[in-house]
Image: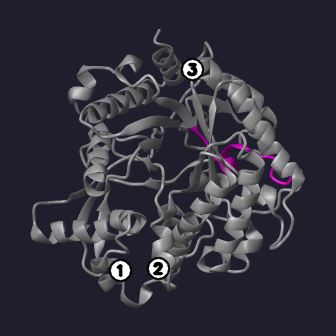
């Protein structure tokens, strides 16, 4: 079922956005770089997870991925020619440190220095994400993010990267999607390290947020005029029905999925109602932790893909809630609901609830089953429409007064899609994984025309 709304009636134009609006694409290190054990890179939790039978579809890993480690000039050329003026990337921690207390790996530092120079040469403003899920395995062997010592290790990593790149990189994202790091990796077990313990997930989450808070002043000390924030994966939440039970379930889910992150980041601490529900699973919090987490930031990154519908489910999980699959709704190939109005709803709520200052859409994109046709093109009309409709919704919410300053499409290229392996494609550029040939999809051609105002 295809929905029609105002965003379908009025396709967006770049001229409808501010002249200094940032237009980019986003990627992450483990998903595109490859070069799994070159130049001193050590094992990450995703290398270990992918090597565990049954964890990743097809037994795939990021060992080669898009070979971006060697082919980045071509990828950046594509981004430049598309008309991007910004590029969001992440730094592979396992390329920088190989042991606790060790010295930074010069070859790893040099690679990211070359990468940043390559962006700047092509007019791409670099946006560096310090952590996008590829924790070094040697830290996981000591307990990973569940151990407070990993916060200190993250600060050493942050210090090394900001000292090396801070003369050229002004925009820093400490973490990508703490929900996924903590809950999907340590409660649901679907991502590395693959644990299924709720209390562990909550402790991981606390340490991730704490490491963010402690990293912000460090980044500012090392980088003149630094702009620092983090990126959260967030959903507008809907009750499955008008019943009091489903509405109460929505509120319970909201406390963990939305407020558990935003409340402490903006000085309110963890929501008391959620703490009351989780009881003994609550994380250990040291004096000063919550003040550190609430450090003022320069922007908030918002990653949006789909809304969630919540149903009361007594006894199901610690919150007694169930997230329903979409019914009678347009979906992507991953079964995610296509709801551009949800982007506007989410941004308006964040602005109303927290007034976080400038916001950036640091991820937004769609997965479809792309096919390369006889003439070599990739006619992904559904992704093109998805992009158009979400940009139209973004235009409308900005016109309504929400301070969004940039948009990063996920993703520049097809890549290793975590537990889905290589069977799912999000890119505006198609990757033939046998030949590593890059082909701009029709969605990428539309984005190019949009950005160039052709």
Residue 332 in the figure: left or right of residue 170: left
- Which image quadrant: the N terminus? top left
Label 2 Cα crowd, 10 Å radius (few <14 / some 14-19 / many 20+)? some
Residue at 69% of width from left, 54% of height from top? Answer: 222
Of the image marks 1 and 2, the number of the one nearer the N terminus:
2
Of the image marks 3 and 2, the number of the one nearer the N terminus:
3
Residue at 88% of width from left, 56% of height from top? Answer: 40
Kindly identify which numbered label has been placed on residue 198: 2
Q: CA distance from mark 3 to mark 1?
A: 47 Å
The residue pinned by badge 1 equals 318
Q: Quadrant of residue 243?
A: bottom left
Against 371, is 210 above or below? Answer: below
Label 1 Cα crowd, 10 Å radius (few <14 / some 14-19 / many 20+)? few
Residue at 18% of width from left, 71% of height from top? Answer: 248
Q: CA distance from mark 1 to mark 2?
A: 8 Å
The answer to the question of whether label 1 and label 2 lie on touching residues, with beta carbons closer than 8 A, is yes
Looking at the image, the residue that sits furthest to the bottom is 280
Kindly identify which numbered label has been placed on residue 344: none
Q: Secondary structure at mark 3?
A: loop
Q: Which label sits in the foreground, 3 or 1? A: 3
Looking at the image, the residue that sits furthest to the top is 454
Give the camera-side residue of 312 and 113: 113
Kindly identify which numbered label has been placed on residue 83: 3
Q: Quadrant of residue 146?
A: bottom right
Against 280, is 348 above or below? Answer: above
């Amino acid at each position: 079922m295809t929905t029609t709304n105002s965003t379908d009636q009025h396709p967006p134009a770049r001229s409808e956005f501010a002249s200094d609006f940032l237009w980019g694409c986003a990627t992450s290190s483990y998903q595109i770089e490859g070069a799994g054990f070159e130049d001193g890179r050590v094992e990450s939790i995703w290398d270990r997870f992918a090597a565990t039978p049954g964890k990743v579809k097809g037994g795939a890993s990021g060992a080669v991925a898009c070979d971006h480690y060697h082919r980045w000039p071509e990828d950046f050329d594509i981004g430049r020619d598309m008309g991007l003026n910004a590029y969001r990337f992440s730094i592979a921690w396992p390329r920088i440190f190989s042991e606790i207390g060790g010295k930074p790996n010069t070859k790893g530092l040099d690679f990211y220095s070359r990468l940043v120079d390559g962006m700047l040469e092509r007019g791409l403003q670099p946006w560096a994400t310090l952590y996008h899920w590829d924790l070094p395995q040697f830290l996981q062997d000591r307990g990973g993010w569940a151990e407070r010592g990993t916060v200190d290790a993250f600060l050493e990593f942050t210090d090394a990267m900001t000292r090396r790149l801070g003369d050229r990189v002004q925009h820093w994202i400490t973490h990508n999607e703490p929900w996924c790091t903590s809950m999907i990796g340590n409660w649901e077990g679907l991502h590395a390290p693959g644990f299924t313990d709720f209390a562990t997930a909550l402790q991981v989450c606390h340490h991730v947020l704490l490491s963010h808070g402690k990293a912000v002043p460090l980044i500012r000390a090392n980088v003149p005029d630094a702009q620092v924030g983090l990126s959260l994966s967030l959903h507008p939440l809907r009750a499955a029905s008008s019943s009091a039970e489903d509405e109460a379930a929505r509120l319970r889910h909201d406390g963990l999925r939305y407020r558990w992150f935003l409340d402490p980041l903006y000085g309110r601490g963890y929501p008391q109602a959620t703490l009351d529900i989780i009881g003994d699973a609550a994380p250990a919090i040291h004096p000063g932790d919550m003040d550190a987490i609430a450090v003022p930031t320069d922007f908030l990154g918002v990653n949006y893909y789909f809304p969630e519908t919540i149903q009361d489910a007594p006894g199901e999980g610690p919150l007694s809630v169930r997230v329903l699959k979409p019914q009678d709704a347009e979906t992507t190939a991953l079964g995610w609901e296509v709801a551009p109005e949800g982007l506007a709803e989410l941004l308006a709520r964040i602005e109303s609830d927290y007034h976080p200052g400038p916001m950036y859409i640091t991820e937004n994109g769609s997965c479809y089953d792309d096919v390369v046709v006889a003439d070599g093109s990739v006619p992904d009309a559904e992704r093109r429409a998805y992009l158009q409709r979400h940009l139209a919704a973004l235009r409308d919410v900005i016109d309504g007064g929400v301070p969004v300053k940039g948009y990063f499409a996920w993703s520049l290229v097809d890549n290793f899609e975590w537990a889905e392996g290589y069977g799912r494609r999000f890119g505006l550029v198609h990757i033939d994984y046998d030949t590593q040939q890059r082909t701009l999809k029709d969605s990428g051609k539309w984005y190019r025309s949009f950005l160039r105002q052709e």
